[in-house]
Amino acid sequence: MKQKTLTRGIMAVFAQGNEDADVQKVFAQIAEFKAKKDKEIADLTAQLATTAKAEDVTALQAKLTEAETALNTMTEQINALQLNGGSGSVNAEEKAQIEAMQAFMRTGDIRADMKKADDSNGGYLIPTEWDRTVTDKLQEFSPLRSIFYVQSTSKPAFEKLYNMHGATSGWVGEEDARPKTDTPTFKKELFATGEMYANPSATQQILDDAEIDLGVFLANEVQSEFAIQENKAFISGDGAKGKPYGLLTYAEGGTNANKHPLGAIKVVKSGNANDITVDSLLDLVYDLPQSYSQNAVFMMNRKTLAKVRKLKDTTGNYLWQPSLQAGQPSTLLGYPCYEVAEMPDVAANALAIAFGDMKRAYMILDRKGVSVLRDPFSAKPFIQFYTTKRMGGGVTNPEAVRLLKIAA
């Protein structure tokens, strides 16, 4: 029976670090396991050749199959291993970039395959796998990325065209002239991207000595800072220094009330100068056009949520319905309700609750790519990793959302 060899797979996986003591231990353990299984398979094969009883043959064949399966499984796992034990498929170019980034993070050595085409600012691109790791972390940490629409772009800005209608028509007789009618007009809205940054650090000794996953290290450091900064901007950002314009700034009477071609976001009053009423929530829901209600959701912060959960209808039933399924949001008046910490508290004139089809109302614009600059000089003995991401955001359709204002 044909035996599989492990030599090629093992060398492919551990070629980079075969001088380390830990790797040598792994080599020894794998060799020991292989030798043990090879001997077990040889013994079983020899016994099988000299056994005549059918029941013994069946038992030996089962043991032989089990031993071969164990050896083959280990071979496949070893051959399938990627850099740092990853399970995904990484092509040769991405693997070279990741290896280059590891060397850069630890020692500052620069390889040709990790330099930007234009490195005049001293920046270096993080490989694709790193970008996906940071992005995935942001999506887990930031609820707004699952509520709003996210658009990726390789350009510094994104332009959207709006049909302002205006076409006219008329009735004519069989032989009447057909004069020219008015044509629809268009307006455009530009969504620019700005730069967001984080600056995690680690000592050179940790980078030299610790067997750490640098991708996980960087992603965990960056995701919290990025998520906090962008969530604030998506709700109340003022556009300064490239910051996105926040959803609430487009409200009637807000700083961006006249910015959008389709006008401002309409506001519904709560009916109480300092609180939320049941009737105002009903008004909020039914003020939204029916075409946007199918995918509508509520957004509010935790304190507002506590107030809303205490509201009851005329029969004494709570308006709030807790979710009975893991991973699904609770509902308010039959619509999903999301907790967004950056929404304002209930207070006079505050825009405490947003309701609408958020994916049609607001767009997050991600400029593709995350970059990192290694700085070993500014904060010795720490090595700083100045990490940036370019992104933007803004309201795409103010008609798809309504805001509840705390006012009589």
Image (cartoon, rainbow, N blue to C red):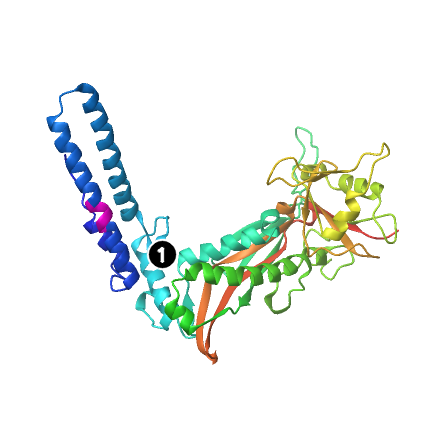
Going by the picture, which residue comes out furthest to the left? 50
Q: Residue at x 46, y 78 (%)?
A: 381
User: In the rendered view, would you say 31 is above or below 195?
Assistant: above
Q: Give whichever of 395, 79 is nearer the camera.
A: 79
- Main secondary-structure element of the magenta-colored stretch: helix
Asked if residue 113 is among those painted magenta in the image, a careful observer would answer no
Would residue 392 appear left or right of 131 to someone viewing this image? right
Residue at the disc numbered 1:
84
Instruction: Kindly indicate the quadrant of the structure image that contains residue 158.
Output: bottom right
Q: How many marks?
A: 1
**Residue type of the residue flagged with mark 1:** Asn
Would residue 4 appear left or right of 242 to someone viewing this image? left
Residue 400, image x, y percentages: 68, 45
Residue 325, image x, y percentages: 62, 36
Instruction: Kindly indicate the quadrant of the structure image that contains residue 283.
Output: top right
Magenta stretch in the rendered image: 31-35
Residue 364, image x, y percentages: 58, 54
| Mark 1 neighbour density, 10 Å: few (under 14) some (14–19) many (20 or more) | some
